[in-house]
Image (spheres, grey):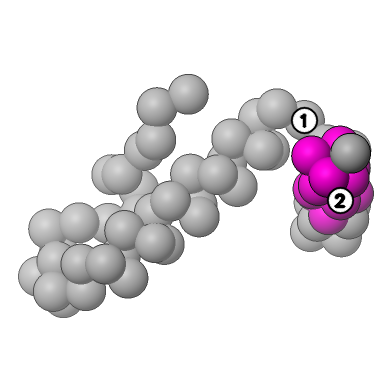
């Protein structure tokens, strides 16, 4: 029951995000883009020295599907 509620809440949050930020319904491409953005930001927080040196950028880091 908890897992179903967590999934529903996640879906609703994604629906709100997609509607407010992009004016479109949820799509798998938008979910993948959001996931990659979150992963890139977390990697940059873990390795801030690479950001300053230009060795690591958000465009070059991609998560596998």
Quarter of the rendering containing residue 54 = bottom left
Q: Position of residue 12 (x, y in %)?
A: 90, 49
The residue at the point 68 percent across, 38 percent down is 30
Answer whether residue 3 is magenta in the image. Answer: yes
Q: Quadrant of the N terminus?
A: top right
Q: Is residue 20 visible?
A: yes
Q: Is 46 displayed left or right of 38 in the figure?
A: left
Q: Which residues are magenta?
A: 2-15
Q: Specify which label sits upstream in the sequence, 1 or 2.
A: 2
The residue at the point 21 percent across, 74 percent down is 48
Dot 2: element: helix
Residue located beneath label 1 in the image: 27
Q: Position of residue 6 (x, y in %)?
A: 81, 47
Q: Is 56 displayed left or right of 21 in the figure?
A: left
Q: Nearer the viewer, residue 12 or 60?
A: 12
Mark closer to the observer (1, 2)? 2
Q: Is 50 displayed left or right of 10 in the figure?
A: left
Q: Mark 2 Cα within 10 Å, few/some/many (few <14, many 20+)?
A: few
Residue located beneath label 2 in the image: 9
Answer whether residue 32 is magenta in the image. Answer: no
């Amino acid at each position: 029951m908890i897992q179903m509620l967590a999934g529903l809440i996640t879906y609703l949050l994604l629906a709100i995000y997609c509607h407010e930020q992009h004016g479109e319904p949820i799509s798998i491409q938008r979910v993948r883009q959001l996931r990659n953005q979150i992963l890139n930001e977390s990697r940059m927080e873990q390795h801030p020295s690479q950001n300053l040196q230009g060795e690591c950028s958000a465009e070059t880091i991609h998560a596998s599907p």
